[in-house]
Amino acid sequence: MERFDIIVVGSGIAGLSFSLKAAERGCRVAILTKKNQAESNTNYAQGGIACVFSSGDDFELHVRDTLKAGDGLCQESVVRCIIEEGPERVEELIRLGVAFSQLEDGRVSLHREGGHSKRRILHVQDLTGRAIEQALLHAVAESPQITMFEHHLAIDLITSHKIGRFAAEQNRVLGLYALDVRTEEVKTYSAPVVFLAAGGVGHVYLYTTNPSIATGDGIAMSWRAGAEIRNMEFIQFHPTALYSKTEERFLISEAVRGEGAVLRNTAGEPFMQRYHPSADLAPRDVVARAIDAEMKRSGATHLWLDISGRDRDELREKFPSIFAACERQGIDISRDRIPVVPAAHYLCGGVAANVDAETNLPGLYAAGEVACTGLHGANRLASNSLLEAVVVAHRAARAVTGYLSNDYPDVPALPEWVDGDVRNSDERVVLSHNWDELKRTMWDYVGIVRTTKRLERACTRIERLRQEIHDYYWNFKVEPTLLELRNLIEVAALIVECALQRRESRGLHYTLDYPEKRGKLEDTRVVQGHDA
């Protein structure tokens, strides 16, 4: 059994930022990441980090834009906290070595994206996430207080009630079990604090911009341990993913539209002005629904994003990864239109947490896409997520230090994982078939536009899949595909349950049965009994 002060699950911007801050405060930190250390949603974040960083912008404008995008469900105190503390955190990234793109006169280059009233997106060309990730990883590697465990997939949290200790006290976190993918051994990690930064849920859908790691592990683990889950119905579908014959979708950053690209239908006509006064710079949910409506009206498999006619070298310099990805598909974006289609991109719900990353389960903290702090409300304003991650991580390090200084009993010796009589599976085809059925069910019935009947159909199918995987889990040795599918099925059920609770259309949740907004503003919530 490995013992630490803090176990961090995930190696994106939230997990790495928090680990550095906690290590500076003297904590021994273990970072568990299920692939290599650079594989995270952060690494694929193209657009940048939204922050008030020019004399022509101010906090009130950023707050207003965020509240407007969140469609009434943002917590204004959280919004103000994150936006006002943002510049200092961005300055820290710069000191760590993140070289944000600059103009010829030396000022920081600022993009504008949909929903923003000003240019406030700091970026490193269209590779911002990768640049931030590399700077943070370099700093982590130099810290003697931090140990990185690559290819370790967290399975479940260990809590005091789960092991039958301290039954008279409030349930609290004691550690977790994780699968070492390379050795196929389940290991026990002991710590009074687990910090979840495990990312989102994109691969619950057939088409997603997310990397393969986005399987909802942190949310599913938290739910099984009794943490509150909130607002899972709010799935942001990025409106412009590169259309191809494969299931994977390469994201065409919103910054391309910010630089003047226009969406066109199959007839070549611009259409966004019919859906929103801001036309192509409307909020993402509006753009995604507009594209969905145009595709259904025409029967098209994709629409077009057009930035042709611009200087080729300029486009290659501003959007190198996008330019290269399109070029590999035979598309020169300076001459050709880009085929685009919506794809699942970002979860605005998640584990309920405050701005210090605290959850309702003592010892469990959550930040980044895995968490629901109240910043995004019903719809995330573009590029606010990286800002949230660094601000909440900074505040969480202080909160965790305070928690560890309290007089909690020491973490006891934890039980080791027991495989029992289970065997290696000779029926792995069940996993691939069930995964495919789950993704198609979610895409067909719980997509951009929903109805109660579709949600109920999804609920029935997901429950059947849940039972099959539950039986499989208890009869065969654990492996990554099984664990991820188990988590995705739990996450899918949470999304549907929250969607059925919300009998209105708001933000990213649009249902034909309840097309109007209700007067009462409420979050949807799901709480599972401890250690299901």
Image (spheres, grey):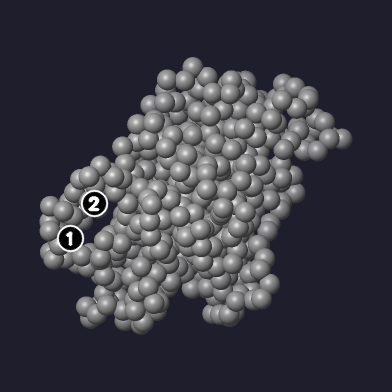
Q: Which residue is mark 1?
A: 333
Q: Crowdedness of circle 1 by 10 Å Cα count: few (<14), some, many (20+)?
A: many
**Residue 154 seen:** no
Quadrant of the image containing the N terminus? top right
| Mark closer to the chain start, 1 or 2 | 2
The residue drawn where x is 38% and y is 38% is 132
The residue drawn where x is 52% and y is 19% is 145
Task: Name above or below for residue 159 compared with residue 187.
Answer: below
Work out whether residue 86 or residue 226 is closer to the camera in this orientation and state it. 86
Q: Position of residue 116 (x, y in %)?
A: 41, 61
Based on the displayed image, in which of its 4 quarters is residue 249 positioned?
bottom left
Q: Is residue 218 left or right of residue 278?
A: right
Q: Residue furthest top?
A: 144
For residue 116, the mark is none
The residue drawn where x is 12% and y is 56% is 312
State the separation of the CA atoms marked 1 and 2: 10 Å
Q: Residue furthest front?
A: 55
Based on the displayed image, in which of its 4 quarters is residue 22 positioned?
top right
**Is there CB contact under 8 Å for labels 1 and 2?**
yes
Q: Position of residue 400 (x, y in %)?
A: 64, 32
Work out whether residue 519 or residue 186 is closer to the camera in this orientation and state it. 519
Q: Name which residue type carries label 1.
A: Ile
Work out whether residue 71 or residue 495 is closer to the camera in this orientation and state it. 71
The residue drawn where x is 57% and y is 48% is 81
Based on the displayed image, in which of its 4 quarters is residue 75 positioned?
bottom right
**Residue 152 seen:** yes
Query: Tag 2, which secondary structure?
Result: loop
Q: Which residue is mark 2?
A: 319
